[in-house]
Amino acid sequence: MISLRRFLIGFALVALLVAGAVSYLASPSPDGLDAATTRGCETVQTDTGEALVGDCIARNASAHHLSDSPLADYTVGGRAHLTGVAGVIGATATFVVAGGLFWLLSRARRNRTSP
Amino acid sequence: MHMSDGLINAPTSLLFVVVAALGLSIAAWRARSELDERTAPMAGLVAAFIFAVQMVNFPILPGVSGHLLGGALAAILVGPYTGMLCISIVLIVQALLFADGGLTALGANITNMAIIGVVVGYGVAVALRPLVVRQERLRFRVLGGISFAAALCGTVAASMGFVLEYAIGGHVTSGESTSLGAVAAYMLGAHVLIGIGEGIITAVTVTAVAKARPDLVYLLRTAPRRVEVRA
């Protein structure tokens, strides 16, 4: 059995590889829910951008409050070719937040069981 | 499967913020018994791995894709309560940093993917777990099969969460593509296909972890009869 340390390092490298490189292979098509909510509509170009015409659920959708944020839509400053960089930032941020919370929760238990 | 803002009305969005907050409070309380010095960093990496894999949409139909939700995967590896927190953190990071999934829809998205997906996925995994104990030589394949079934069921159940929210607070009309029946049928069909992809990713990942470090697979570690899975 490989050591815990080596296993965790390997797992982290796999996560970074997927976020930083495999993410370029992602399908650009809408996912199942987006496809369901845009059924019945067509996308048309207007002066102000794209609009949905027809009868579909997504016509009620509003723009994201943070759609102007630097990493919006897994880009860096709107540059789609930097998806891998956005992915590495996101995976790292997720690890920091989740790891921090789980470390605190595991400490909470230790303090309770051995005061 | 991230909902945008506005698909369901404000009272329904608020209702599911409350549901999500209650669910996550219980999860944070109970996750303490799933976590220790060894499993806390593992659980953080599981969350990061799910974030990464969620970026890789795979095609399921012409012009339609799907991505991993990860509820069954997280629950099998690190436990159901920790798993709920993992998926929720992924969804919060996606909504706040990447503008993916609406802010007012965050409660509904957490309810669907982090609560329903985990509860159903982990429930199926636990129900099928005795099969691993009985099989001597085919343990990894059986574990892979269980992971596949758990992920498929969890994904379909999560998609039905959206249908429930649409039924409660969506602008349901009698249109050909906006009636409740049409939306439910399309969501079911699409998410059976997405669930197959989710099942494959989940089975491969769980089997790989079990072969390297079976002690890091929560589902095996907590079996009533100890499961010996040797690498």
Image: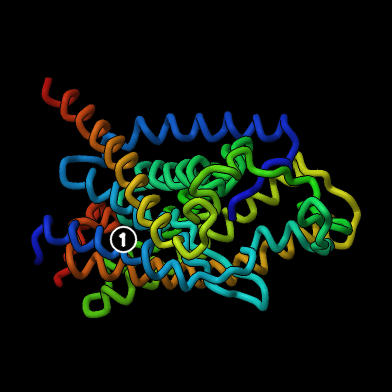
What's the residue at 79%, 45% (across, down)?
A60
> In the image, what residue type sits under mark 1?
Leu
Looking at the image, residue B53 lies above or below residue B11? below
- Please give the count of numbered marks on the rendered protein: 1
Q: Position of residue A76 (x, y in %)?
A: 47, 53
Between A112 and B224, the one nearer to me in the picture: A112
Relative to residue B22, is residue B101 drawn left or right?
right
Q: Foreground: B152 or B205?
A: B205
**What colour-coding does the image apply?**
rainbow
Rendering coords of residue A34 (x, y %) = 67, 59
The answer to which of B184 and B227 lies nearer the viewer is: B184
**Which residue was labeled with disc 1?**
A16
Q: In which quarter of the image is the C terminus of chain A?
A: top left
Q: Residues within 10 Å of mark 1 (few under 14, many from 20)?
A: many
Can the viewer see residue B81? yes
Q: In which quarter of the image is the N terminus of chain A?
A: bottom left
Please, which residue is most extreme toward the top here?
Answer: A115
**Residue at image coords 37%, 33%:** B28
Residue B75 visible in the current orientation: no
Question: Which SS class for mark 1?
Answer: helix
Q: x, y (%) of residue B45?
A: 28, 52
Q: Which of A49 and B145 is in front in this view?
A: A49
Q: Which chain carries label 1?
A: A
Q: On the image, which quarter does residue B53 sit in? A: bottom left
Residue located at (23% from left, 27% from top): A108
Tell whether B193 sits left or right of A47.
left
